[in-house]
Amino acid sequence: MNLTLLILLPLFTAIAILLMRNATQVKWVALAGATAQFILAFVLLFLFRQERAGGNTAQMLFELQYNWFPSWNISFHLGVDGISVAMILLTAFVVIAGVLVSWNVTKMTKEFYFLLILLSLGAYGFFISLDLFILFFFLEIAVIPKYLLIGIWGSGKKEYSANKLALMLMGGSALVLVGLLGIYFSGTERSFDLMKLAQLNIPIETQMICFPLLFVGFGVFTALFPFHTWVPDGHSSAPTAGSMFLAGISMKLGGYGCLRVATYIMPDGAKEYANIIIVLSVIAILYGAFATMMQKDLKYINAYSSVSHCGFVLLGIGMLTKTSMTGAVMQMVSHGLMTALFFAVIGMIYERTHTRQVSEMSGLLKRMPFIISILFIVGLCSLGLPGLSGFVAEMTVFMGSWEHPDTFRRVATILACLSIVVTAVYILRAITSTAMGPLKAGYETLTDATWNEKLAALILVAGIIAIGVAPFWLNDLVSPGAEIIMQKISPVTTGIK
Amino acid sequence: MPNATYITLIILLPLAGFLMLGIFGRKYFKNTSGMIGTTLLFVSTLLALYTAYGYFFEYGKVDGIYQKLVPLKYTWLQFSPGVSIDMGIIIDPISVMMLVVVSFISLMVHIYSLGYMKGDERFPTYYAFLGLFTFSMLGLVISSNIFQIYIFWELVGVSSFLLIGYYYDKPSAVAACKKAFIVTRFADVGFLIGILILSFYSGTLDFNTLIATLTSPESNEYKNAVAVSFLGVSALTWGLVLVFIGGAGKSAMFPLHIWLPDAMEGPTPVSALIHAATMVVAGVFLVARLFPVFAISAPDALSLVGYVGAISALIAAVIACTQTDIKRVLAYSTMSQIGYMMFALGVSKYGGEEGLGYTASMFHLFTHAMFKALLFLGAGAVIHYIHSNEMKDMGGLRKYLPVTHITFLIACLAIAGVPPFAGFFSKEEILLAAFQHNPIIYWIALITSGLTAFYMFRLYFSIFWNKEADQHDAHKSEGGFAMMMPLVLLAIGAAAAGFIPFGHFVSSDGTRLETELHLQFSIAPVALGLAGILIAMWMYKKESTKPDTVAASLSGIYNAAYHKFYIDDIYLFITKKALFNLIGRPAAWIDKNIVDGLVNATGNSTRDISETIKGFQSGKVQQYAIYFLVGIIGLALLFIYFWK
Amino acid sequence: MIEPGLIYHMLFISATLFFIGVYGFFTRRNLVTMLMSVELILNSVNLNFIAFNKYLWYDKLDGLFFTIFIIAIAAAEAAVAIAIIINLYRSHQSIDVEKAEEMKF
Amino acid sequence: MSGSTIIFYLLAAITLVSAVLAVTTRMIFRAAIYLLFSLIGIAGIYFWLNYEFIAAVQIVVYVGGIVVLIIFSIFLTQQAGEQLPKQKMGRQLFSALAAFCGLALVMLQLAQHEFTGTGNKAVEPTVANIGYQMLGVDDNGYALPFEVVSILLLAALIGCIVIALKSKPEKA
């Protein structure tokens, strides 16, 4: 399969959207494009599994390389492994759901959909790049539409949030860029090629400097404590689809970058800084969870819980075992689906009740059984109910983390485990007080979900359940990739024989 | 060999019911959902009975020992070589016994609910949730992998949450379901960490392998697990204690019991199924499942189980004497009886005659399921008739509810340990086991058994005798066939289950255990039981002021017990005051003001700096020219004199 | 015939003239007088070119050509400048630079 | 001190003194006149150096063209007799200081620098030589800059017209 399709498809969709005359056409073109992406992602999955089943054990499949800027050794180098395929699937799910829930956007519809599709273009490009320069290029493509999405279609203090988000993410990108250049100029060979750099054994001094730059840079995207404050403001001000993309896709760019770029290229740096990463991620997990408990706005609740959940991604990476890395990727996929769905549901509720304050809602189950059922599913997923994706991912991280016999990591793991209680507290608080209790006066005429909302929700729920009920396929997809990343990190003493 | 397909079907049929009714029920099966659920479960129950028959009488026994068979195992999630979550089926005496109990009680509740929940707006949802619960509980008991049990453990918890909150527009129900979920969740963290510890040291998650490695003193795994210690206690003991915390949460052991009384907000049949007969004994089941490890490798952990069980039994019995809500009385009674099962395990040893406690515990679990379900369903019938849970609204109902009255009486006699009802046999075994191994626990158990008889008959007399029935509408009937049939069936069970030679089937090591009655030993408990009944009769048979007088004379302890020994208030203090105010609020504050403040401060200082700098851009050409010249001179000096 | 030492004199004159022009450019507030200062500066440059041509590279005429071109450009520049000044005067009723400061911040 | 040298110093003095007066006087018209003298002084220096052609150009373009242009613009924008507004004292001092420092620096550098001329044969700056080279297209020809400057002049011409045009009143 030619991977450029993944870039060209959104590109042509975006162009086609610009050529459309009215909002209806725009919507249908966007939906068609998103559906095509969705199908393409599954075709990719299918072909990938076929290749692997056929015995192709190359690290990257479907590789593709064009010279782009030969004098600086920049090439247009694409390729996927299991981790990328998982992330691409996630993106496809979120994009189609995002397009569907935005069906009622009336303000500048064409531009809105254009930006959504552009963002997906950046994400796909990011996930399939094997050249750090184009990886960075796509990263930037994925950042800029967010600013506009929040600034134009947002709500509340949207300008503030848009600025904050864009500046913090740009700051992160700047660190990434500095780190990339540091790597580029450090070795004997000037190269941006990921696969080449991974073989190069970058000197430890360089790693000590560049690893934190890259990790923190990407970490900003994935809400690394204390660089997470864009998350609550950004998510709560963004339009529904914007929040979905932000939490479902953008935050994953960071996690993927931490894993694929920082840890893969600089294993020694990762080992040196592992303890710091663990401490920060445990803080993010617990502190995010406790901060969530005090939130009153549904979007803030989900945003802070994202901080907590993304902490698991970083914890999985910081623990540096194959299982924990696999868990980190699973958590990315799971959290992407789950949080996108959560934001979609919040958006649906908000469209009907015109409030997001938990205290102002009550007994909605009576009027909108479908939406609230989805809310229950996503809430339960968030607190890690077996059968849904969150459980699988968190447990994999825990199991991976527990493979270290030293006390420090043990304590970290136990602290992280404790968060599942806090998660239960805030999730139950949020869903019971919105959904249950007597129906609030004035809400008697609320209606249930429309076809597009139902479709969007069901697609995401299908993803969540597919992972939750049958995690082995995702595990099989991801763990070989994690293993390769782990190969260069000299085997950490594992207790499990 | 057992047929894996049948056993899988036992579990999957309720799940099918859940999916079908949950997704399509509201639209297509508005009225037929009850019948669908019940039929599916009926098939399940038949299959379970068939499996039990097959296991106990056909293939289960090899050389006189019941084997642990694993007819199905499927790798669900591979962590690292050897460590994986498998979805499997384990067939051994306790899992088969539980299969029968769970499916049978569940079937009774399904049938009963056909009458009890008739006309409810969310009828299909109710049956869907029942299906989900039954699925999870059945899955739990046949789990062959410790992580698999955790998975179903959580699913059981969530179905319990959904069913407690079934009347979702009642704020008290909403609060109760939250509380139940969060308290058990808290305990589950212990369970989870326990799993992590056990899996780390044994290198597996599979029950059979895990038990085998951790109970053989020669294996390296065992040596490691015992050698590593934390706070003077070996890692293995820690792991088991943590697992037990999980079990204690689910089984409402002191001090994690606070959710159980509140859980009575759910529909009464649900209380009968989940919060009396099946889910709450999951903790007991878990300890029994890991019993060899407890008994052989970590006797300290096992004695902890024993003491926790005994304390819970006593405290719950005392509290039960003072409660006025009949369902709450039953809830505390459940807790007390589970305490019995726990300490029976706690005083047991592994293997042979020494394993009497194990058998007794399982036996009690079995009989308790019968009579406690019966009690709840009977209470349900009463509540259905009176529309109130409070004792003071009841009295003299024996004429109006004859079937309920008789069956309820049988259940009360059974729980009070009056021969020849089921409870007598199982309780005698427990007391015997305790007597043999731990006198302290034995005395606690004895006192508790007297209290049990007292509070059960207090309940019985208050409902069916006491003041004469007033203006209850005569035209109201006791409830249809659907409600009466389960009562009668369960009453038969409660009356006759004790005659099953339980030790022949279930014992700690799978061998045949002969249990005989020691008549001279039985005198004390039976006498105490009868005394309890007589006191209750004296106080409550006729309407009088005696109870108040007694309560007044024992005011200190009465008040403490009436307020559940203030444990709820302590929890409330810890969570509301401490957790929210001391951690949650500061965390949110720090985030808003310090972390975010720093971010904003960075932004603001950038702006301030630029405000200062922009003064240079005055728009005045001459100023620019001066800067320009000064700059040039500066650069020239720099390059000429300093940077040659 | 040629005294090389004189080049120093020429360059001193040129430099002095230049800084006189600079001083004028800094202190004058009237645009026309600023333009005059600029002309002085240009002339000092011309003088420099000529001096170098005369005393150091007398075998070529390049300095001379530069001077010619500078004079041509200066003429054009003066014309444009004056057009701008007049336009500014129309819009501001003044040609005080201190008052023409819209392009700030 | 030969007569030639005296003339040189005289010309230099005229140039510098009138330049100083041109930038300091507060009568704008007088400033223009002082500028005129300064430019004439420079033309004199050109004559003194035997660069007659340049001297002529200097007089024709600067004295005859630019200064006249400046005087016109003074008339167009200003009451000729008015005194210029006084600059702030601080600004004056600072400008003088900056200019003086710059001058000192340049002078210092000049004084320390040793100039060496080429030993080649001199080329006479006659009008014929200038003319040939100006329009020559060989290695030393200046035809291209010449053309460029002519285009620049044209552009300046058009630019002047456009800038100085009165903007039309906007149509309603």
Image: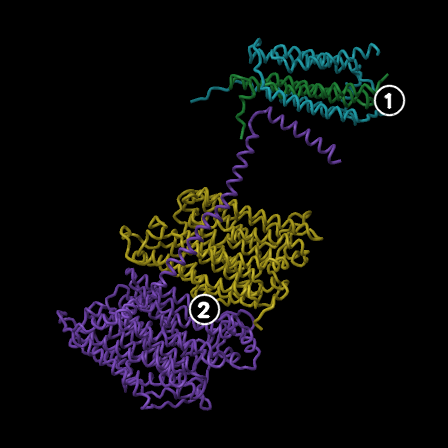
Chain colours: A yellow, B purple, C green, D cyan
Q: Quadrant of the C terminus of chain D?
A: top left
Q: Amino acid at mark 2?
A: Gly
Percent of width and height locating residue D96: 65, 21
Could you tell me if residue A29 is visible in this image? Answer: no
- Res C5 seen here: yes
Q: Nearer the viewer, residue C93 or B212?
A: B212
Residue type beneath disc 1: Lys
Please check whether the numbered discs 2 and 1 fall on a single chain: no
List x then y, in percent, for residue B566: 33, 66
Pinpoint the chain carrying mark 2: B
The answer to which of A267 and B322 lies nearer the viewer is: B322
Q: Residue under label 1, please give it.
A: D121
Circle 2: element type: helix
Tag 2 near tag 1, CB within 8 Å? no
- Residue C28 against residue B384 in the figure, above or below: above
| Chain of the residue displaying label 1 | D
Which label sits in the foreground, 2 or 1? 2
Residue D73 image position (x, y, % from top left): 59, 13
Residue B308 relative to residue D39: left or right: left
